[in-house]
Structures are given as structure tokens and as C-alpha cells.
Amino acid sequence: VKGAPSLLLRRCTHLKLRDGKIVPISSEARVQIEDTIGSIGAASLRCIALATKDEQSLDAELLKENGQYNEILKDSSRFASIETGLTLIGLVAIRDPPRPGVSESIDLCKMAGIRVIMITGDAKATAVAIARDVHILYEQDITSIKAFESKEFFGLPEAQQLEALKCDNLVICRAEPADKQ
């Protein structure tokens, strides 16, 4: 299983160590993993978590008689219930640099009075770091910047949403495809 580390880590109960040994995830290890995920994002890197589930712990109904996976696995609404008791096997950090000229284009937009709204599926720390790299955001203090997780932004009263949209550039992260419409 691969996915957003913050979501996938919640579904993991075990951790695979470098020597191949599988151990329960302690609260200390969970905090260390979360810190690592935050550090990866703050370095403008995208992070993906990788986990696995032992075949013996899969429900028997998931396998067909001929050993092929059945239709249940094609229903994405069932993934969360199936993807429990996972073993975290690693984190992958990916550098996806902006295209050449993006920062300059953002600067030109700002000089022309055009505000930029960045909508991304990235985690907040990653989105903010990338937005700073391409000059969408300038503030160093993460508490003073205009960056919202999608659910946070769309959970605000409409008046507050409109106020956030009125001035300065804005970042909306952890967006779902429907949020980009």
C-alpha cells in the first residue's frame, strides 16, 4: 500500500526494521516517524509512505478460489477497512522541482496585481515549502501565512473564506480533486 504518510501511518500497527524484523510501532517510534515526515515536507520534498499487510492476515473473502483477488478490492470505499493492521516498511522522499521560470512568473503576477492561489494535494509543510520556493509565500512564520488544509478552508464560514480570498496569495493543500474545480 502506498499513500499519504499522515493517513497511512494511522493504519499501521507494526514497523519493519532495517534487519527485516517486524515489531509493533511504539508511541516513541510513531513520534519519530511523524517528525521525519515533517522534516521531509519542510525540505520541499513530497513524501509517500509504503506499507504492507501479511497475506495470512487478509480476510479469506478477499481471495478467489483460483488465488485471484476478487471484486471487493476494486471498491475504493472498502480500502480503509481492509487496510488496517499494516506494517510500515518505509518512507520515500521525492524531489519534484518546479519548472524553470515559475518563480519569475509568480513575481510578474505580483507586480501586475494578480494574486496566486495554489491548490495542491501535498501535505501542508510540503505545500508551504514549495510555495516559498516559487515566491507564492514569503512569510517565514507558518502561523502567519495563508495556508489551509482543504477541509479546514471549506469548513470555515463563507464570510471567512471570502476574506481569505480577498488579499494576498493563498495555498490550499491536502485538496481533493473536487476542490480544484
Image (cartoon, rainbow, N blue to C red):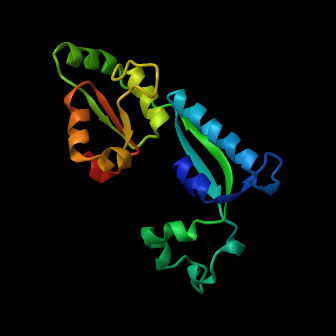
Q: Which residue is drawn at 61% across and 80% down?
A: 67
Give whichever of 126, 147 is nearer the camera.
147
The percent coordinates of residue 102 (x first, y second) are 31, 21
Residue at the image point whose x is 65% and y is 58% from the top: 12
In the rendered image, residue 147, in percent from the top left (x then y), is placed at 37, 33
Q: In this view, does 86 lie above or below 165?
A: below
Where's residue 138, x and y in %? 38, 18
Vertical side of 130 occupied by 103: above or below:
above
Q: The N terminus is located in which quarter? A: bottom right
Asked which quadrant contains residue 104, the reply is top left
Which residue occupies 61% across, 51% down?
A: 50
Instruction: Name which residue lies at 83% across and 48% down.
Output: 19
Q: Locate residue 20 relative to residue 91 in the image: left or right.
A: right
Pick the front one: 24 or 158: 158
Kindly tell me whether residue 39 is visible in this rendering: yes
Quadrant of the image occupied by residue 168: top left
